[in-house]
Amino acid sequence: MTDNIILVGPMGAGKTTIGKRLAKHLHRPFVDVDETIEKRLGVTIQTIFDTEGESGFREREKNILNDILNENNNAVIATGGGCILTEDCRKMIVCQRLIIHIDPIKKVFVKLSVLFLLNSHPSHKYEKHCHLPSRQPLRRSVT
């Protein structure tokens, strides 16, 4: 088990914003999985979806998440909104020290009794597809 803190939740929930603030507060590096995918591949996530479909993207996401977790032991890591859809990603996530579920409606769920509260939660407009009820049990299964 590593000392990474993993943030999960729907797209637009504030994982990146909260993750950056939490990392700064804890003096840890911050890694955004979606940003890492775009940097390493040199294209946008939308381009990957357009050319390879969701299954191609999820395979790349799984491999890059694995790399990120192997390269970091004490980081705050924000996953992509659909990362929990892949069973292999869920298995990697639950092996981390702390998993925080950022839920824009119910606020924050935490796996352990340790709770890091931030002073404010950004308000966002959320896209309907980001909050598919079918994804909630998967997010909760890893927190």
Image (spheres, rainbow, N blue to C red):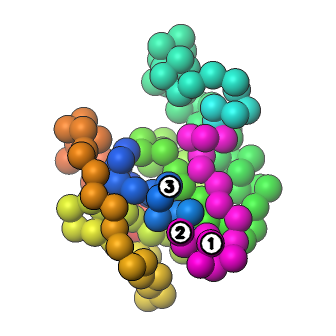
Question: Which disc number belongs to residue 24?
Answer: 1
* Crowd tier of the residue under label 3, counting other residues whose Cα lies within 10 Å: few below 14, some 14–19, many 20 or above: many
Q: What residue type is labelled 1?
A: Lys
Quarter assignment of residue 74: bottom right
Badge 1 density bin: few <14, some 14–19, many ≥20, Cα 10 Å: few
Quadrant into which the N terminus falls: bottom right
The CA span between labels 2 and 3 is: 9 Å
25 part of magenta stretch: yes
What's the residue at 35%, 47% (across, down)? 12
Q: Which residue is drawn at 56% across and 40% down?
A: 34
Alpha carbon distance from label 2 to label 1: 5 Å
Q: Position of residue 71 (x, y in %)?
A: 79, 56
Residue that badge 3 annotates = 16
Nearer-N-terminus badge (1/3)? 3
Which numbered disc, 2 or 3, marks the residue that appears first in the sequence? 3
- Residue 99 appears left or right of 124: right
Q: Amino acid type of disc 2?
A: Arg
The residue at the point 70 percent across, 24 percent down is 42
Secondary-structure class at tag 2: helix
Point out which mark residue 21 bears: 2
Which quarter of the figure is the C terminus placed in? bottom left
| Residue 37 in view (yes/no) | yes
Region of the chain picked out in magenta, as a range: 21-36
Q: What element carries label 3?
A: helix
Q: Main secondary structure of the magenta part?
A: helix
**Residue 21 horizontal/vertical position (percent):** 53, 69
Residue 58 spot, x, y in % from top left: 53, 32
| 106 over 11 or under it: above or below | below
